[in-house]
Image (cartoon, rainbow, N blue to C red):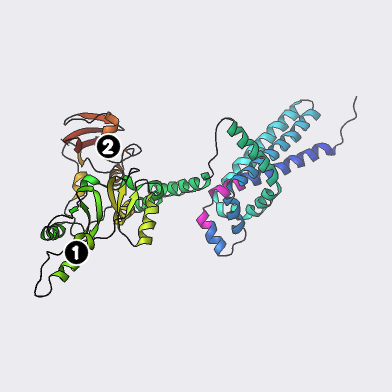
Amino acid sequence: MEPPLPLADPWLSLLGILFWLLVSAFFSAADTALNAAPRAALKSLADKGARGAVAALAVIEDNERMVGTLLLGRIVAKVSAAVLAAGLVLRHGLEAGGVLAVLAVTLLVLIFGEVLPKTLAATHPETTALRTAATVRGLIWLVGPLLALVRGLSDAILRLFGLKTDPNRHILALRAEIAGAIAMGHFEGAVEKEARDRLLGALDLSDRTVDEIMRHRRQIEMIDADLPPDAIITRVLASAHSRLPVFRDNEENILGVVHAKDLLREADRLTRGPEASVAGLDIVKVAMKPYFIPETTALDEQMREFLKRHAHFALVVDEYGALQGLITLEDILEEIVGEITDEFDVVDRSSALKPTASGDYLVDGAATIRDLNRAMDWRLPDDEANTLAGLVIHEAQMIPTEGMAFSFHGFRFEVAQRRENRLTKIKLRPL
């Protein structure tokens, strides 16, 4: 018979289990706190000189290594506690006491190593993050080489299966976190709908391109450079726009962009003196050099270009150089603040969003899906089409005739008016 184990061995095992239980609780609390603590709050605390705030921000910034370190710490703590518990079972020969010890350790790990520390950390995320960040930061430095090895192996396995990691995933996750916080704030009543739309609109500028919001070339008002000067002045004065493209021979041959103020200034100069006449007006000389941009330009990039050039107006072309439309600085700003109107905007676009007696909405086919979603809190998809007419054509896989109706995405769509190949009026009703 083997000699009995020293009396101190079980107590040492219990102390070891308790130690690893505390270690598990620390890593669980740190994991919850560092993921739940708002970065803005931590940045504010760091600016005020709060201890641990700088370390917390540094740890959160290095998100991948933080997750790896916390996961490794929790695994080591739980495995070590399990090994010590298994030792107790072996010493007691699977008797009732040993089984109860294993059950007790499992329950302790679940309650005091997971649930309780996570609950406390979620209740006080900033405080917990400040108290645990310095230790976690030191552990990240300590196990950094091991984490680098593990990361290299995981990336190699992913490449073996043809998968690649996104180097910008942290930035994308941060943007998704901000958008989620804004949406949750609106859901809970802390953020008004208008504020939500503006914040999300500003956040989406980098994901959207000018071809999504530009005025299509069919809707562009242009001036023929070969028109008589009197006719040119009359057309410019009659227009609701202050800037108009100038073309010659065909509308693809854009010579410049004339500003109404520049034209009137030149007309005023020509009409002064005894031989006053606008017959000598050359609109091409008055017009500004056209500013062309590709249709794939991101909205935030184009807004920066407008501000850098002190410009408000650009002509959009495709990859072949063909004119597709135009975009203004106001168009981009409207994606943030909503529709901007002045005394010259005589069209009441809001009337298209008033339901009829039957509950249908009669909407212009050229209305953008994004504007409809923003105004009505709908969730129509805008991945395949920018306008309502484009969505109907895409889903129908044809150009429908008047009276044809379709149901998709939780709405009923009916073509109310068609001109040539354009769906100009569409009735839709939520189902």
What residue is shown at x 29% (from left), y 31% (from top)?
395
**Label 1 or label 2, whichever comes before in sequence order:** 1
Q: Which mark is residue 263?
A: 1
What residue is shown at x 18% (from left), y 51% (from top)?
348
Task: Report the quarter where the N terminus lies.
Answer: top right
Q: Is residue 16 above or below residue 329?
A: above
Task: Report the quarter where the C terminus lies.
Answer: top left
The secondary element bearing badge 2 is classed as helix
Query: What residue is pinned by disc 2?
Result: 390
Crowding at dot 2, Cα within 10 Å, few <14 / some 14-19 / many 20+, comes out as many
Residue 288's image quarter? bottom left
Crowding at dot 1, Cα within 10 Å, few <14 / some 14-19 / many 20+, comes out as many
Res 359 seen here: no
Residue 307's image quarter? bottom left
Please name which of the two marks, 1 or 2, marks the residue nearer to the observer: 1
Q: Is residue 240 left or right of residue 112?
A: left
Q: Are dots 1 and 2 in contact, CB under 8 Å? A: no
Amino acid residing under circle 1: Leu
